[in-house]
Image (cartoon, rainbow, N blue to C red):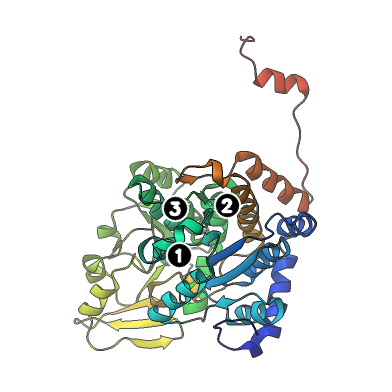
Amino acid sequence: MIEHDVKDLNLATAGRYKIEWAESQMPVLQLIRERFSKERPLAGLKISACLHVTSETAALARTMQVGGADLVLCASNPLSTQDEVAASLVANDEIPVYAIKGEDNETYYRHLNAALDHHPHMTMDDGCDLVSVLHKERKNQISEVLAGTEETTTGVIRLRAMAKEKVLRYPVLAVNDSMTKHFFDNRYGTGQSTVDGIVRATNILLAGRTFVVCGYGWCGRGLASRARGMGAQVVVTEVDPLKALEALMDGFQVLPLSEASSHGDIFVTVTGDKNVIDASHMQAMKDGAVLANSGHFNSEINIPALESMSKGEPRQIRPFVQQYTLENGRHLNLLGEGRLINLAAAEGHPAAVMDMSFANQALGLEFMRANAKTLENDVYTIPEAIDREIARLKLDSMGVKIDTLTSEQAAYLASWQEGT
């Protein structure tokens, strides 16, 4: 048996069924897998991947394996692992996996280091933790790494900060910034899966509730839209005047969080920042308010402040609901320990959305292997031609046909001579 650390290998059969179901919803990745099986563009490449260990990620891992990659996988969040999927990848695909749902912080970082013990030529990250550990604690390995990819907004922010400070030691592809990733994954995936996680965790009715969305980036746009579709009265809070204006013109009420705090029934952070919901906001909240986060790290809600404001230990009133009792007797309900609620209490994005995100990862790896030696130690966006090809393949898989430019139209768009 290959080295691994998963919850229970007896879950492997259930995991295989779950992976097969996801793969049936991922036609673009299946087309890429067919080509990879013939061309093997990743042959001889050792990859350490730090991703959410879900059935969709398993589809990507199996595609990379078919393409010739030697892959090790660890979790990018302590609560996002689907244990049956982790077991299946080990037992059925012989992919080393280090991931257990609910693992503590010490285990999480032990698993990160286990993935780096693979001595990768490329890293695949979701949140930049793998890259961060490599740059801080295992600098002697960096010379072995050709390039990397990054899946999510938070990770791209960290990587760009590293590049700006000239400490990033190899080129990284910001998969998150391709249109077929953030435009669909962040808006449609996060929007649906966050609502799914909140409803599964609480079983509360959203209709008629005041639903406060903290942040109106692509994730916030999708979440606000889906919450409104469920009948909630949506309030958006923002620090960016352009995004605040967009939210207002999209028909949402826009308030400072200091004002929204006393009105909201449900609060969700999707900003990628720290202490977005702070002590002063929680002091003003209603009895029974629900707090959730769908950003990558559990820093968006000031949990230490919530703990210091409370008396006694929180009650685990439902599997993913911790109820804190404040000194004045009011209760605040924190979902999923403040971690990504769509993965902590639900299953993350639908496979049809991750089809495009992971098509970007697969083709991004292929691109970086071919071009890494010509790139600076910086953060790059996937080429537009690849982005558009993924969109075309997705449309084809859905049976949707679009128009093409005539030669006359193409020439007109490329010229300047014709005017009024």
The label on residue 130 is 1
Q: Which residue is mark 3?
A: 156
First-in-chain label (1 vs 2): 1
| Disc 2 residue crowd, few under 14, some 14–19, many 20+, Cα 10 Å | many
Q: Nearer the viewer, residue 324 or 162?
A: 162
Circle nearer the viewer, 1 or 2: 1
The label on residue 242 is none
Q: Nearer the viewer, residue 264 or 188?
A: 188
* Residue 249 quadrant: top left
CA gap between label 1 and label 2 equals 21 Å
Question: Residue 33: x percent and y percent?
Answer: 74, 59
Q: Is residue 280 visible?
A: yes
Relative to residue 254, is residue 294 depicted above or below?
A: below
Image position of 150 (left or right of 393): left
CA gap between label 3 and label 1 equals 13 Å
Amino acid type shown at disc 1? Leu
Amino acid type shown at disc 2? Lys
| Disc 3 residue crowd, few under 14, some 14–19, many 20+, Cα 10 Å | many
Amino acid type shown at disc 3? Val
Kindly state the secondary structure of the residue where label 1 is placed: helix
Question: Residue 406: x percent and y percent?
Answer: 77, 25
The answer to whether marks 1 and 2 mark residues whose Cβ atoms lie closer than 8 Å is no
Quadrant into which the N terminus falls: bottom right
Kindly state the secondary structure of the residue where label 3 is placed: helix
Taking the view exactly as shown, the residue that stands out farthest to the left is: 327
Q: Which residue is mark 2?
A: 181
* Residue 164 quadrant: top left
Question: Residue 222: x percent and y percent?
Answer: 51, 55
Circle nearer the viewer, 3 or 1: 1
